[in-house]
């Protein structure tokens, strides 16, 4: 039964991702880009670094492609990692 409850919760909340933008001198501020913010909710980010934890309803592939397109980045510059939910439901 716990799995059944997890599916609607994930759809409502979105998927958790860690985003790290590497090998660039520019500081990427996702919060300042309305096109990106339309698809994500920032959970954590320290100003001045290019590492974020976000929630999104779009897939990791689409999210990575959007960030690459918006900031003119290459595939090896955008490291996007799906994060597992914590707690007993996350272990399933």
Image: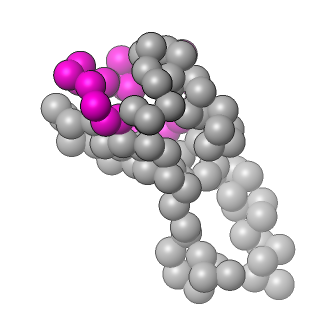
Figure coloring: one colour
Relative horizontal placement of residue 43, taking residue 4 as reference (left or right): left
The answer to whether residue 29 shows anywhere in this view is: yes
Q: Is residue 89 left or right of residue 11?
A: left
Residue 37, can we see it?
no
Viewer-closest of 88 and 72: 72
Q: Is residue 82 left or right of residue 49?
A: right
Q: In the picture shown, does residue 49 fall above or below 54?
A: above
Q: Indicate left or right for 73 with 87 as reference.
A: left
- Which region shows up in magenta? 21-42
Looking at the image, which residue is at 55% across and 69% down? Answer: 85
Of residue 32 and residue 5, the one placed in the foreground of this image is: 32
Percent coordinates x, y for residue 73 in the rendering: 43, 21
| Residue pictured at 77% horizontal, 64% vertical | 7
Q: Is residue 62 above or below residue 1?
A: above
* Picture quarter with the N terminus: bottom right
On whether residue 29 falls in the magenta region, the answer is yes
Please give the name of the residue rendered at 42% of the width and 16% of the height, measured from the top-left corner.
71
> Where 86 sits versus 38, above or below?
below
Q: Position of residue 38 (x, y in %)?
A: 57, 24
Q: Give the percent coordinates (x, y) of residue 26.
A: 23, 19
Q: Quadrant of the C terminus?
A: bottom right
User: What's the residue at 77%, 72% (across, down)?
Assistant: 5
Residue 56: x %, y % from top left: 59, 42
């Amino acid at each position: 039964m716990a799995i059944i409850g997890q599916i609607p919760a994930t759809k409502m909340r979105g998927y958790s991702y860690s985003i790290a933008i590497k090998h660039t001198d520019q500081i990427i501020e996702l919060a300042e880009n309305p096109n990106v913010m339309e698809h994500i909710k920032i959970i954590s980010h320290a100003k001045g670094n290019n590492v974020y934890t976000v929630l999104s309803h779009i897939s990791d592939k689409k999210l990575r492609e959007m960030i690459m397109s918006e900031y003119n980045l290459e595939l090896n510059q955008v490291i996007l990692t799906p994060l597992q939910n914590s707690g007993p439901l996350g272990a399933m």
